[in-house]
Structures are given as structure tokens and as C-alpha cells.
Amino acid sequence: MKTTPWAYVVFGVKEVHQVRKGTEVTDRIVGRYTVRLVEDRRTDDNPSGLLVGEYREQQMVGDRETGLLQHSDLETPAAEPQQ
């Protein structure tokens, strides 16, 4: 087996959708993901011989999208907030 680490840093955007009081809210989170792979022996179940040795996620920027009013029928409609 090689002793060279397989380490990668990846940047990505994750969207988290939630329904709150009958309205869908979307959070967009920019994150930094660190993945380090380790070599193992190749098998039928793991033909590449690579396993995840370490995984870390770090939030860099978060943004909540509340401009879209998408009502859901999953919950009973709540009273409209007074402005």
C-alpha cells in the first residue's frame, strides 16, 4: 500500500429546505469540505480500495431566502402575521 495521503478540499453550496408555519424557507450555506481518503485492499464490495479516513465540514457563508412565499399543504395554514 502507498503511504501518500489522498486529501481534497472542496467548496460547495448546500440548500436546506424547511417548512415553517406553512411557508417554505430555504437556507443556502457555502461550505468548505475536507475529505481524506485512505487506501485499503480492493474487494468486491470496495473495488477502488479507497475509504473515507476523515471528513470535515466548515460553514463559510450562510444566507436565508425568505423572498419566495411558497405555501405548503403539509401543515395546517397558520394565521397570517400582522404587519
Image (cartoon, rainbow, N blue to C red):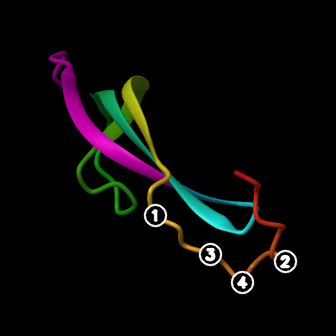
The residue singled out by tag 1 in the image is 68
Q: Quick one: label 4, few (<14), some, or many (20+) residues within 10 Å?
A: few
- Alpha carbon of mark 2 to alpha carbon of mark 3: how far? 10 Å
Helix, strand or loop at disc 3?
loop
Which comes sooner in the sequence, label 2 or label 1? 1
Q: Nearer the viewer, residue 20 or 47?
A: 20
| Point 83% across, 67% down: residue | 79
* Amino acid type assigned to the residue bearing label 3 in the image: His
Q: Quick one: label 1, few (<14), some, or many (20+) residues within 10 Å?
A: few
The residue singled out by tag 2 in the image is 76
- Alpha carbon of mark 2 to alpha carbon of mark 1: how far? 19 Å
The residue singled out by tag 4 in the image is 73
Residue 12 falls in which quadrant of the image?
A: top left
Relative side of 52 to 19, left or right: left
Magenta run includes residue 14? yes
The residue singled out by tag 3 in the image is 71
Magenta run includes residue 2? yes
